């Protein structure tokens, strides 16, 4: 949904996309124009290599020159794309122009093949991150115009955020060229989570690379607008009278909320928004249950960016969630123990910070926080005041579904659930890093709202649980109807598809 919205915003300005030519007759890149290709010296007997950078890149990107120089040694022709005009303006803006840039590149390739009598089969586009998807759109454009495919596309860790679960016509895929090969180096984080080429390579497992510090994996890039303001965060109320009605401190006093009803505050994670499907699913389940006010937090103006940037926004978002809670409590007479914050991934730590701020404001805790596979990168090993912990609410329960990869593995709540062992979920791919497992935590939770058959057993490990060594131990329900007097680690297995509870 969000990808469709940002694509509709695209509009390229004249001169914003530059093409730079390089071969053994030129010692440096020289700028060329699509309409005046006759002015360059192309060796029509050699392949044409097109290089396309990603987010925050430019013609000065550090991989262009060494790749070009290596190809020049083979007398190849090289054209580098410079779309820095948009690439440096943030992830959403960059995404919005990828299809149009791809069409421009496709037009350039068609013109070049006709002017210099090059074969489409000899054209190879190499794109990094968002540049991979630009390459894909180029291939689609060429096929639509010529009814033929270009020779090859190489995707260098194609961008994942907002591309992971879209249909293949909206991203790079194996149909975009005669041969598409992919090198995955940061799968499930900045890179796409699935195999999308004719051949997909996963060096060092495809997630974290040797010699890279974990923090380096997330690219510490400073961008404008790093501070979070109150206007950046929106809150949307759903109950028996309203459906996603936007609220603020200026209007919720007129909503006639029943202070005897629980308030469920749900908070999405990285690259998600108010349109995330688990929001609507949770809202629908709570509507069936009744007597509940559901407030969806939308912090997409700060979540749809590089992971390292989103991480820096988490505490500030938590602060504004805490302000909403304390204002509602004071003005509407809703006791703090009736507030239940439910967060997924980075949203879990937002919930934790919100709980900490409520304590600092009011001297007491919110009733409950549920962490749905709390994000691990940049939080693992942090002190308890820098992440979600069992000190942040009267009761904290955590559902671990991708522990040790995208999700936190250690026990950090009063109750920690480990469905299917807590790292890889039934029905998901074999890679532990598959985001499918990470994203099943919200699904398990919203299915539990009206289904109390997610029965979990207190146990020390998944193997002991599966071997029956814990059969006599305490049993509790995972999800909405948890016994809030329970403490410890609990294990259960689930089905491989919905409905997931096995009873």
Image (cartoon, grey):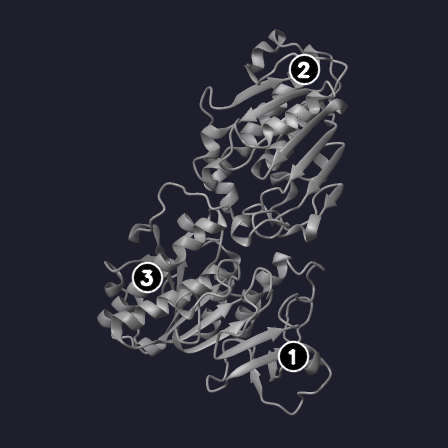
Q: Please report the residue visible at 56 percent of the width from the left and 52 percent of the height from the top.
A: 213
Badge nearest the viewer, 1 or 2: 2
Image quadrant in which the C terminus is located? bottom right
Camera-nearest label, 2 or 3: 2
Please tell me whether mark 3 sits on a helix, a strand or a loop.
Answer: helix
- Give the residue drawn at x 69%, y 53%: 205
**Comparing labels 3 and 1, the label whose residue is closer to the camera:** 1
Q: Distance between the residues labelled 2 and 3?
A: 57 Å
Mark 2 lies on a secondary structure that is loop
Q: Name the residue under label 2.
A: 24
Q: Point out the residue furthest to the top here.
A: 39
- Return the disc, 1 or 2, that comes first in the chain's sequence: 2
Local packing at callout 1 (Cα closer than 10 Å; few below 14, some 14-19, many 20+) is some
Determine contact: label 1, label 2, CB under 8 Å.
no
Residue sitting farthest toward the front: 211
Tell me if 344 is positioned left or right of 39 in this view.
Answer: left
432 versus 449 height, above or below: above
Circle 3/circle 1 CB separation < 8 Å: no
Q: Earlier in the sequence, mark 3 or mark 1?
A: 3
Which of marks 3 and 2 precedes in the sequence? 2
Residue wearing tag 3: 319
The residue tagged 1 is: 461
User: Front-most of 471 and 244?
Assistant: 471
**Location of residue 436 with respect to 364 vertically, above or below:** above
In the image, 6 versus 270, the foreground residue is 270
Question: Where is residue 41 shown, x and y percent of the image?
Answer: 66, 9
Q: Tell me the distance, in whole angstroms, between the alpha carbons under discs 3 and 1.
A: 36 Å
């Amino acid at each position: 949904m969000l990808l469709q919205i940002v694509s509709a915003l695209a509009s390229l300005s004249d001169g914003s996309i530059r093409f730079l030519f390089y071969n053994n007759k030129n010692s440096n890149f020289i700028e060329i124009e699509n309409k005046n290709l006759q002015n360059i010296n192309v060796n029509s007997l050699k392949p044409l290599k097109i290089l396309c950078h990603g987010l925050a890149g430019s013609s000065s990107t550090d991989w262009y020159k060494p790749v070009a120089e290596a190809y020049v040694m083979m007398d190849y022709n090289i054209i580098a794309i410079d779309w820095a005009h948009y690439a440096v303006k943030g992830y959403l803006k960059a995404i919005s122009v990828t299809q149009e840039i791809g069409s421009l590149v496709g037009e350039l390739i068609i013109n070049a093949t006709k002017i210099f009598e090059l074969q489409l089969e000899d054209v190879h586009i190499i794109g990094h991150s968002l540049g991979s998807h630009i390459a894909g759109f180029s291939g689609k454009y060429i096929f639509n115009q010529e009814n033929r495919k270009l020779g090859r596309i190489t995707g260098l860790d194609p961008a994942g955020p907002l591309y992971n679960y879209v249909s293949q016509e909206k991203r790079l895929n194996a149909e975009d060229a005669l041969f598409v090969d992919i090198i995955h180096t940061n799968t499930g984080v900045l890179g796409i989570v699935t195999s999308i080429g004719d051949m997909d390579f996963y060096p060092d497992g495809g997630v974290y690379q040797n010699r890279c510090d974990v923090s380096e994996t997330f690219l510490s890039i400073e961008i404008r607008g790093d501070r979070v303001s109150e206007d950046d965060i929106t809150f949307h109320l759903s109950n028996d009278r309203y459906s996603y009605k936007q609220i603020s401190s200026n209007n919720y006093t007129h909503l006639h909320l029943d202070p005897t009803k629980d308030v469920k505050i749900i908070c999405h994670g990285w690259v998600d928004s108010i349109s995330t499907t688990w929001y609507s699913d949770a809202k629908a389940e709570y509507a069936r249950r009744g007597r509940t006010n559901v407030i969806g937090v939308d912090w997409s103006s700060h979540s749809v960016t590089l992971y390292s940037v989103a991480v820096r926004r988490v505490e500030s978002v938590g602060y504004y969630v805490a302000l909403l809670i304390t204002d509602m409590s004071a003005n509407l007479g809703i006791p703090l123990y009736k507030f239940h914050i439910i967060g997924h991934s980075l949203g879990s730590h937002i919930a934790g910070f919100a709980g900490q701020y409520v304590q600092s404001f009011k001297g007491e805790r919110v009733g409950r926080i549920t962490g749905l596979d709390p994000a691990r990168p940049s939080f693992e090993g942090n002190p308890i005041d820098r992440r979600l912990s069992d000190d942040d609410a009267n009761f904290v329960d955590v559902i671990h579904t991708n522990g040790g990869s995208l999700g936190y593995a250690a026990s950090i709540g009063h109750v920690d659930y480990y469905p299917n062992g807590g790292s890889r979920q039934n029905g998901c791919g074999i890679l532990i890093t598959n985001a499918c497992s990470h994203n099943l935590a919200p699904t398990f939770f919203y299915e539990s709202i009206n289904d109390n058959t997610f029965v979990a057993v207190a146990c020390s490990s998944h193997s002991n649980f599966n071997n029956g060594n814990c059969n006599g131990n305490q049993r509790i329900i995972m999800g909405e109807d948890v016994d809030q007097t329970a403490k410890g680690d609990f294990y259960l297995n689930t089905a491989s598809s919905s409905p997931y509870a096995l009873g």
